[in-house]
Amino acid sequence: MILTKSYKNNKVNYADKIITTDGHEIHFEVKGDPLNTPVVFLHGGPGARVVPAHYDFFNPKLFFSILFDQRGCGKSKPFCELKNNNIQNLILDMERLREKLGLQKWILFGGSWGSTLALYYAINYPERCLGLVLRGVFLGTRKEIDWFLCGMRKFYPEAHKSLLHGLNFSELERPTSGEILKRGSELILSNNEEVSQKASNAWAKYEMSCSTIDYKEREMSGSSALSLAKIELHYFLNNCFLKDNEILDNLSNIKNLPIYIIQGRHDTICPPFTAYKLKNSLPNSNLTIIDNAGHSAFETGIKKALITALDDLRNQV
């Protein structure tokens, strides 16, 4: 029995919140019958948010889907709050949410940073997981952060040049990832709102422009850019609050869980090598490479594979 008690709000679609003991208010939304297979959606970033299109992955006739804005993101409060914002507290929030909904177990569905969070939660609470569906795997290591900040310029030099310009580097400078993080902390985390917004826009534009197989400059501004840049920078400055290779070193905890990995062949933000590394460490997992795709969950091949994997997993539990 997956549902251990009835949640007080029995509406098919509703929103609610969790109040933590350390100053955060976590906004969440649910859709579908609570007796359906429960699945929790973990958004990326860190610093992104839930958007209506995320519901398209979950058939409400089959799934009880739970989507929440992580600390400082979207409709969660305080907006862009960095205090007590770390991966350890994020999985505690997930446990509070699971308990509030009266769920014994659930499927974890996450891509990019959402895959990091899913894996870290599963490693710590394997008994609460029905299985995982992951996309664009990111393990939160320093090498991956360095790749994002410097390595991607080998494929998207124009996007990287725009990022450096937005962070006030000269055209002749070739900063290291550490130097980019340092400059980012000076500008993005500045108390000057205009300075912070301008640098945040450049950071978010860099990430969004490189997210699909078809390169295109994609502007992001306002609150969406602020939360993505500030919170992502906060996590990168702290190595995602993980020991290096902490996730890979603890995968034995989840070796018996059904795990589906969907990976774009041309994902430059989270390259396929990491997904292969995860697959090799979890021989029973299923890895699907989508040839005509990059990083985004909304690319046609990626989206179709994610929905198929989710249905396959539902049939196993």
Image: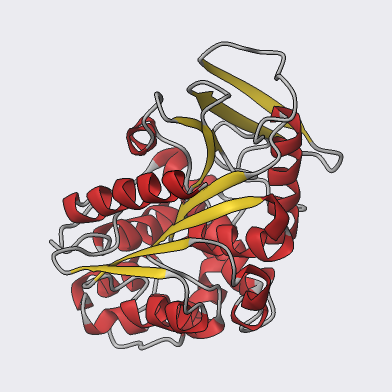
Query: Is 129 left or right of 174, judged from the image as shown?
Result: right
Disc tally is 0
Q: Is residue 278 above or below residue 133?
A: below
Observer-nearest of 305 and 211: 305
Which quadrant holds the N terminus? Answer: top right
Q: Quadrant of residue 268?
A: bottom left
Q: Quadrant of residue 186?
A: bottom right
Residue 96: x %, y % from top left: 76, 39
Residue drawn at the location 49% of the way across and 85% of the way down: 143
Query: Is 158 left or right of 12, judged from the image as shown?
Result: left
Residue 282: x %, y % from top left: 51, 77
Residue 132: x %, y % from top left: 51, 56
Q: Is residue 303 above or below residue 188?
A: above
Residue drawn at the location 75% of the way across and 24% of the way down: 5
Query: Is 178 left or right of 244, judged from the image as shown?
Result: left
Observer-nearest of 307 and 13: 307
Observer-nearest of 290 and 157: 290
Residue 125: x %, y % from top left: 72, 57
Observer-nearest of 313 and 87: 313
